[in-house]
Image (tube, rainbow, N blue to C red):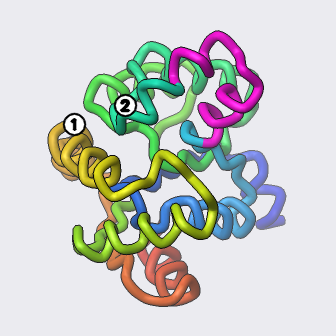
Amino acid sequence: MTSELQITTPEVLLLIGPPGAGKGTQAEKLARARRLKKLSTGDMLRDHVSRGTELGLRAKAIMEAGELVPDEVIVGMVRDEVAGMTPVRVLFDGFPRTGPQAEALDRLLADLGATITAAVLLEVDTEELIARLVKRAAEQGRTDDNEATVRTRMNVYSAQTAPLVTYYETTGKLRRVDGVGSVEEVFARISEVLP
């Protein structure tokens, strides 16, 4: 009975935090455990880039410079992904990234009869994040993660995304989680703070 209830009940989780905080890794585990569709705007964008779509070509130069892709492009992709879900059961990995994206997501969810269940903030020290991203770049051959670009992304995050913490604190949806530790330790901390 409980598993049927979980499948028919809307649930929208957000994983937010700076680049390299472990959102992607935790999103995979969390989506499986809670039977949610994982949506990563970064993955969606990289898919468009690899396929050479018009959006991908436009986004590639922006991403390589460490800047954020414009809100209307990201929100449009998200709308396409969730519009047909009944009920909406999704985990957003790294979205929203800006106040306007958060407001657009709230409107989109309201149109679909859903609200945000919780916004999980993974907190990690900046120098630890830079070390993680530079190591990942070497392991995966990702040109968008050299040290200069990583520092630019951290600055962009601080300026544009960090205000989301205040946004979700005021709605009572924010859950702070220490993002340092093993994958299992961080996952256990996230599970403890979710409703």
In the foreground, 161 or 119: 161
What amino acid does circle 2 point to? Answer: Leu
Q: What residue span does the magenta drawing correspond to? A: 43-59
In the foreground, 25 or 83: 25
Marks 2 and 1: in contact by CB < 8 Å? Answer: yes
Quarter-wise, where is residue 66 in the image? Answer: top left
Residue 42 falls left or right of residue 127: right
Residue at left 40%, top 66%?
Answer: 21
Can residue 157 be seen at all in this image of the molecule?
yes
Measuring from the top left, give residue 1's x and y in whole percent: 84, 65
| Front label number (1 vs 2) | 2
Helix, strand or loop status at disc 2: loop
Marks 1 and 2 sit apart, C-alpha to C-alpha, by 9 Å
Measuring from the top left, give residue 180's x and y in whole percent: 37, 83
57 is higher (above) or lower (below) than 34: above
For marks 1 and 2, the one nearer the N-term is 2
Residue at left 60%, top 31%?
Answer: 45
What amino acid does circle 1 point to? Answer: Gln
148 is higher (above) or lower (below) than 49: below
* Residue identifier under label 1: 160
Residue 192 falls left or right of residue 28: left
- Residue 164 covered by magenta stretch: no
Measuring from the top left, give residue 95's x and y in whole percent: 45, 40
Image label count: 2
Residue at left 63%, top 42%?
Answer: 43
Residue at left 40%, top 37%?
Answer: 96
Crowd class of label 1 (few under 14; some 14 to 19; many from 20; radius 10 Å): some
Residue 53 falls left or right of residue 79: right
Helix, strand or loop status at disc 1: helix
* Residue identifier under label 2: 68
